[in-house]
Amino acid sequence: ENIAGGIVGEVKTRFAFIVNLFDWASFTGLFTIFTVYMFYQVLLYRFQFLHNEKFDNRFITLDLEDIDWRRTLNNRETILPLSRRERTKYITLWSTRMVERERTMFIKSAVFLTVATTKLIIYIFLDYSLFWILTIIRTHGRVRTNPRGITPLSLNVQGEGIVADILKSIIASFKF
């Protein structure tokens, strides 16, 4: 056992640098991949937002307000103020409200997070319950019995004579 432990310890010390290097590289690699993917998604969104009129066009920007104000000064038709239905459909850039698509995605994410959290809590509860049951079994499962032949009972023969001597010898033969 000492030899096996020594071999394992020596192998661990010799390869610790390589294992740490791979751990660091895998973390850094994953971080880099996710960061690059995030920037790609941001650039793709920006490109589509700027070049496609129908893509996520639910925001009232300062430029739109400025254009609408200039149209008002020129006595031309304006889009602001919005109607009640339009107010639910369009928002300003700094609004705390969400558009319908964002709200739907938010609700889906919240439901997914709730389900995942509930499953995690159930798994933790089941794990702890199993641990608790096994601990109870281990604690109370130790049955201590007296070894065979040793009994807390004892017999005493009182008296004298041949019958008493025979009974005393029989009882003595059963005692260990």
Image (tube, rainbow, N blue to C red):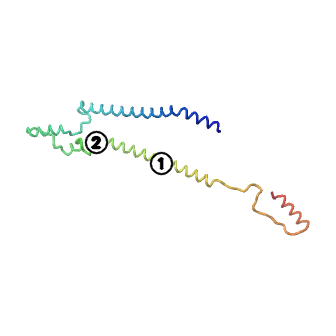
Nearer to the camera, 29 or 118:
29
* Displayed quadrant of residue 160: bottom right
Q: CA distance from mark 2 to mark 1?
A: 33 Å
Q: Earlier in the sequence, mark 2 or mark 1?
A: 2
Callout 2 crowding tier (Cα within 10 Å): few <14, some 14–19, many ≥20: few
x, y percent for residue 40: 33, 31
Would you say 109 lies left or right of 152 here? Answer: left
Name the residue carrying label 2.
100
Q: How many numbered marks appear? A: 2
- The label shown at residue 143 is none
Name the residue carrying label 1.
122
Image quarter of the C terminus: bottom right
x, y percent for residue 26: 45, 33
Amino acid type, label 2: Glu
Callout 1 crowding tier (Cα within 10 Å): few <14, some 14–19, many ≥20: few
Would you say 108 lies left or right of 5 here? Answer: left
Dot in front, 2 or 1: 1
Nearer to the camera, 3 or 67:
3
Q: Secondary structure at mark 1?
A: helix
Amino acid type, label 1: Ile
Image quarter of the N terminus: top right
x, y percent for residue 84: 20, 46
Q: Secondary structure at mark 2?
A: helix
**Residue lying furthest right:** 162
Would you say 158 lies left or right of 87 here? Answer: right
* Contact check, label 2 and label 1, Cβ < 8 Å: no
Residue at image position (47%, 34%) is 23
* Displayed quadrant of residue 151: bottom right
